[in-house]
Amino acid sequence: MKLEDKAVLITGAARGIGQAIAKELACAGAHIIGIDLCLEDLDETADLVTKLEQNFTPFVCDVRDENAIRQLMSRVQQTGGFDILINNAGVLPSGPFANGDFESWRKVIDINLTGLMSLTHALLPILKTRREAHIVNIASVAGKFGTEGVAAYAASKHGVVGFSSALRFELAESNIGVSWICPSMVNTRMAAGVPSNFFTPLMQPSDVARAVRRAIETNAAEVYVPRRMRWLVSILPSLLPGFARWLSWHGKASRGWLTAEKKIPETGNGKS
């Protein structure tokens, strides 16, 4: 799918991965519809996109709010619709599951999984009217292999991977492609202060953005960032599950998330 003159709707577009995706796709000639919780937070992304001589349209929407999603759908239709949906909004609290407030863990599922599914369900009718369309869901390597400190996040991202795979099969004979991206740790405020290592290398938001672009252009299904993570979190656990878990434990793959005890920002979703 060529990106030139396509309209792309990106949730969590104010900063981090969402902002990087907006810039990358604008470089390819796409127009951007940026979604976040606060209109003013989108100003920086708007400047980046307009400097690349592409249109930027900002909207406010909380993906947990079905009324807000319906209003977004109506307003997006009034602007002419869109061709590509990037579900990027997400939160990443961490720490021991037993010690955390369960409402925080529930919020992770509500934003990362249920909100993503709700928005996709509402906006699919628009995508079905386009000659060619695509959905990209930002998952995680934690959606393939859960480790300590990120139990609720891993559960939500396993759900995103399963949902994306099922939806790709359902839409296989339609005009809509579906991709899901599984990055390692990404250098955003979500990961600030959490050490990386061989098992969880630190990537840049631009690395994820380039992967998103390739996925759309080639209609790739599951994409890992970096690519070697497929061996560490998918192939190795399938072939040697016991060894993979031993390696992850002794390599302290996610121990940093366990001790960091990250909280959800009060401003909510999409703030990666």
Image (spheres, rainbow, N blue to C red):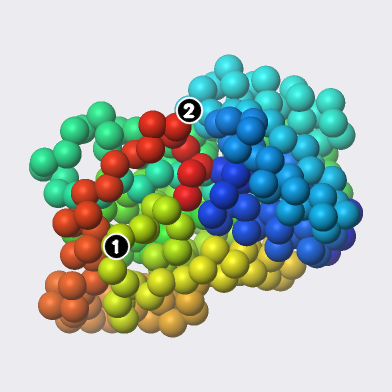
Q: In x, y percent, where is residue 92?
A: 35, 48
Q: Is residue 171 above or below residue 234?
A: above
- Which residue position is annotated with label 1? 194
Residue depicted at x 58% and y 30%:
38
Q: In x, y percent, where is residue 97?
A: 16, 45
- Label whose residue precedes the other's in the sequence (1 or 2): 2
Q: Nearer the viewer, residue 205 or 174?
A: 205
- Which residue position is annotated with label 2? 64
Query: Which element carries disc 1, helix, strand or loop?
Result: loop
Residue depicted at x 80% and y 64%:
28
Is residue 240 rendered to the left or right of residue 217?
Answer: left
**Amino acid type of disc 2?**
Arg
Q: Residues within 10 Å of mark 1 (few under 14, many from 20)?
A: some
Q: Nearer the viewer, residue 171 or 88?
A: 88
Q: Is residue 122 above or below residue 138?
A: above
Q: In x, y percent, where is residue 245?
A: 18, 73
Is residue 269 rendered to the left or right of residue 11?
Answer: left
